[in-house]
Amino acid sequence: MKKVVYIILLCCSCLQLSAQTYDELITRAMDAVEKDSLYQAEGLFKQALQLEPANIRNALLFSNLGTVQRRMGKNKDALESYSLALNLTPYSITMLLNRASLYLEMDYLDKAYVDYCDVIDLDADNAEAFGFRAYIYMRRRQYSDAKIDYQKLLEVTPGDKTARIGIAMANQKLQRYKESLEELNRLIVDYPRDASLLMARAELEVDMGTLDLALLDLESAVKLSPNDTDIYVMCGEIYLAQGRRREAYMAFEKAIELGVPRSLLQEQLKASKGK
C-alpha cells in the first residue's frame, strides 16, 4: 500500500514539475525576446511546445514562435507556426492578422486576401483588414472593390488619410478624374507639407493631359522634398512628352546625382539626347 501511495505521489510531483517547467520555459523565452536573443527564444518556445503538446495555451506559444521566426527572417517557418496557432484557435483575429500581414509581405496576395476576409467576417469594423484588403484589390486592379473598402475604412476611422488617398487613387484608375482631383485638393489643403500628395496630383494631371499643371505641382514638391529622386524622374518624363529634351536630360541627371542608377535611366537619357 505504501508503495502505491509513493508511486501516486511521485506521478503528481512529476506532473507539477512538468507544469512548472513549461511555465519556466515560457518565461525564459519571453525574457529572451525582450533581450532580442531570438535564436534562444525560438528554442525555448519549441521546448515548451514539445514538453506539453496538448496544453491549451499552445496557440499563443505558436503565435509567439511565429513572430520570433518572422523577426529572424524565417518566414516559411513563421507561416507554419501561425497556421498551427490558427488550427487551435481558428477565430483569433490577432492571429489571422499576423498571418495575413506575413502573406502580404511575401506577396502571397490570394492567401492574404482570404485571411483578411475572414477577419472582416469576424469583425465588420476592423480597420486594418479593410485597409489591406483594399490594397490587395488595387494590386489586382479591382478598383471598384478597392474604393468600397476604402470608403468602409473611412467610416470606421473618419478622416483617415490612407483611406482618402486610396479613394482618390481608385477614382483615378476608374477615370473619375474630377472626383479624384477634388479629394486630392482637399488632402493638400489638410496636409500642405506632404510632397507625396503633390506628386499624386501631378500624376493625375498627367493622366488628364494638363502637363503644365503637373510640372507646377512637382516644382512645389521639390521644395518640400529636394532629395526625392522620383520627382526629378517624373519631371524628366513630362519634359520628354513636351519635347523639352534639354530640361528632361537635366532632370534625369539630377535623379542620377541623387542616387538613381544610371542604368535604370538609359532609355530616358537616350531619348532626351535625340534629335
Image (spheres, rainbow, N blue to C red):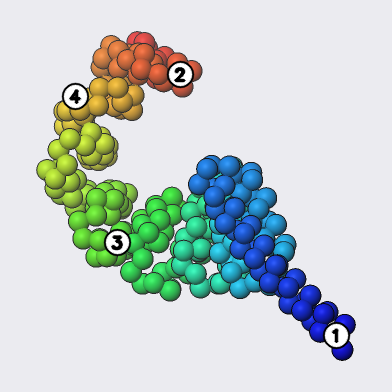
Mark 2–mark 1 CB contact (< 8 Å): no
Q: Nearer the viewer, residue 199 or 10?
A: 10
Of callouts 4 and 3, which one flags the residue occurring earlier in the amino acid sequence?
3
For mark 2, does the 10 Å Cα neighbourhood hold few (<14), some (14 to 19), or many (20 or more) residues? few
Q: Gap between marks 2 and 4, in whole Å?
A: 23 Å
**Percent position of residue 156, x then y:** 27, 65
Of callouts 1 and 4, which one flags the residue occurring earlier in the amino acid sequence?
1
Please state which of the two labelled residues, at mark 1 or mark 4, is closer to the viewer: 1
Q: Nearer the viewer, residue 174 or 185?
A: 185
In the rendered image, the vertical position of residue 175 relative to residue 149, given as above or below: above
Q: Amino acid at mark 2?
A: Pro
Of callouts 2 and 4, which one flags the residue occurring earlier in the amino acid sequence?
4
For mark 4, does the 10 Å Cα neighbourhood hold few (<14), some (14 to 19), or many (20 or more) residues? few
Q: Amino acid at mark 4?
A: Lys
Q: Gap between marks 2 and 1, in whole Å?
A: 83 Å
Residue that carries the numbered disc 1 in the rendered image: 2
Residue that carries the numbered disc 2 in the rendered image: 261
Please state which of the two labelled residues, at mark 3 or mark 2, is closer to the viewer: 3
